[in-house]
Each structure stands twice: as structure tokens, then as C-alpha cells.
Amino acid sequence: MSFNFTLLLYGKPGVGKSYFAFHLPKPHFITTDNNYGYLIRYGADPKACTRISNWDEYNAAVEKVSKLPNSVCETVVLDLLEDAYRMCIEDFQSINKIQYVGDMDHGKGWKMSEVAAVGGICRLINCGKNVVLISHETSYDVKNRYGITNTYYQPSDRTRDIVLEQIMGNCTFVLRCYTEDTQVENSDKLVKKRFLSLVPTPYERGVTRCIDEDTAPQIIPLDANEFLKAIGYYEADTNYDVVHENKNEDVKEIKTLKQLQDDIAKAEDDTKDKSNFVAREEDVQVEVKEVKEEVKQPEQKVEEPKEEKKEESKPMTPQERLAAIKAKIAAKKAAEGK
């Protein structure tokens, strides 16, 4: 085991919260109801359960599980959290001889009962074992300014919010579990599948610590082994399936001293060959450059055939045109006189 975790797990009744907790490492249940009876049918140890009905019995149960060795108990499950809170309130009212916590002046009763409840739950959290606090779910709808209704989920509101907030602050994980009906392929049959929201959505009140939320799967099956694997609970050398999944790729050859010396000598030879190759390449480039220069020296310019330039006729002035016309007329008259 690499670390102890505290999980506050909430969901609707019947989703499988207790069954999930039963498959965690060596669980011992502190129950407020008779639901542990059905877990016995699945192989649960009848002795790994302490039934409580009041706050004194709760404190005695916490003291009992704290003394159990890890070989007997690694995980303590409180089922249900809101029932334990109710027992704390009832005990507070009985001690102070009041019927309602609010009967005490100036909020004194609420503050004193809050301290008692948080202190009692934190004693369980600090018992040196994994702790699972099971709670039912409360959901409520909120309509935003665009008229869209969103459903939000949180642990049962039977636990006062100011108490719940402090308990969540002491938890490693606060996660919601739920069910979805999935249609079987090529069939009209619906199968109910159970999921755990490992990375809470904006609509789920939750906490996730000790894992990278950017790389961790947001949703996993509601299965204890999947949860323990996702949070890295087991050390790598004890999780054989994970370590040896790609063992053929990870195994490295162990070489002898002679083989290492041969590798070093080969690497040195390769380095020398590479440096010689680079030098030869530079020599070739120099030679090519010299040849190019030698070829450029005897080059003679070949005279291109000159095109005969035609004299461009310049435009005649008005005087020249008049003289030309007169010359043509005189020539014509001379020809007629002959």
C-alpha cells in the first residue's frame, strides 16, 4: 500500500455504493442500517461489521476499528454519513436538554453541534486507515438566464452544508456514482451500467486530489479495482498486470564487461570514421571549387550575331513634307514634257 485515502462516495439508493466499498482492501463497516446483510450473501465477513444506533456507539466503533491491525482491516466504511450526523445532533440535544438545536440563543447550538459532528467524523478519518464515507445524493435544478435548466448533484443535504464542507476539506476524493441504461447491441434489451465520476463535472460537487485531472479518465466503471488502479493505490512492484503488460518491450539486455568494452571500441571507431568522412567531404568540396575556378579562366565570350539595326525614320517637318511634294510635282512635269 502506498498511501491512505479518504473517499466520500455519494449516489442514489441502490446504485451500488456499499457493494463497491465491500471490494476495497479488507473493509470493516460501521453501519446505521441493515444493508450489510445482503453483502454477506456476496461473501462479506459477518464479523467485519459494527452496527450503531446512537452517537456513543459511533464513538465506540471508531475506537474499535482504530485498534484493528492492517492484517484484519485496511479500510473503514461509514454507511451512512448523514445518519451519523443525525445521531450526533440527537446526542447534542439530549445532553443539553433541548428539542431543537436552534433553541439555544445566538446560534450557539448550531456552532457547538457543528464542532461535535466535524470532530467525530475527523476522528474516523484520522484512524490511520482508508476511510469511505457513504452518502445518498441530493439533486436540484437551476435555470440560467438563457432559460436552460441544468441539474446539479451533491451529497445528501441531510448533512448540514457547513459541516459537509469541512468534511469534504478532509477528504482525498469526493465522488459521485450513478447508473445509465445502455441498449444491448442488436437487441431491444436495456442493461443498467454503473459508473464513477473520477473527475467531477461542473454539475457535480466533488473533490479529486493526488491524481492529474488532465490525464486521468473522467469516468470509470463503479469497480473497486478500477478505482484503485486509477488513483495509483498499489505500488508498481505489487501491481503485476500493469508492470508486466509490456514486459517484452521493457526488458533490457544485461551485457558483460567484455561486451561493454567492445561496444566502446566500436563507438570510437565509428567516431573516427565519421570524422575522416567529414574531412574527405571537405577536401572534395575544396577540389570541386578549384576545378570550377580553373574552368572559369579559359572561358571566352562568344560574340552573338549582331542584328542589323534599321534606321528609324524620323518624322518629317512640315517644311520637309512641302519640299518633297514640290519635288514630286516637278519630276512629274518633267516627265510629261519629254
Image (cartoon, helix red, strand yellow):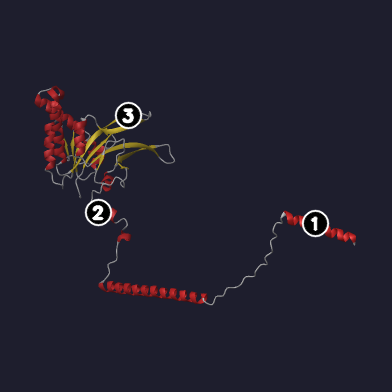
Residue type at tag 3: Asp
Relative side of 275 to 2, left or right: right
Looking at the image, residue 223 lies above or below residue 255: above
- Tell me where residue 287 sits by quadrant: bottom left
Secondary structure of the residue carrying numbered label 3: strand
Q: Mark 1 points at which residue?
A: 326
Residue type at tag 2: Ala
Q: Mark 2 and mark 3 in contact? Answer it, CB < 8 Å.
A: no
Number of callouts in the render? 3
Q: Name the residue under label 2.
A: 236
Task: Please provide percent x and percent y for residue 76.
Answer: 18, 41
Q: Distance between the residues labelled 2 and 3?
A: 43 Å
Q: Mark 3 points at which residue?
A: 141
Q: Which of marks 1 and 3 is nearer the N terminus?
A: 3
Q: Earlier in the sequence, mark 1 or mark 2?
A: 2
Front residue of 253 and 216: 216
Identify the residue at horizontal 15%, vertical 32% (top origin). 117
Q: Nearer the viewer, mark 2 or mark 3?
A: 3
Task: Please provide percent x and percent y for residue 22.
Answer: 23, 41
Q: Distance between the residues labelled 1 and 3?
A: 113 Å
Residue type at tag 1: Lys
Identify the residue at horizontal 41%, vertical 73% (top origin). 282
Identify the residue at horizontal 76%, vertical 55% (top origin). 322
For label 3, count other residues whose C-alpha is less than 10 Å away and answer few (under 14), some (14-19) or many (20+).
few
Quadrant of the image containing the C terminus: bottom right
For label 1, count other residues whose C-alpha is less than 10 Å away and answer few (under 14), some (14-19) or many (20+).
few
- Tell me where residue 304 sits by quadrant: bottom right
Task: Please provide percent x and percent y for residue 40.
Answer: 22, 39
Q: Which of marks 1 and 3 is in front?
A: 1
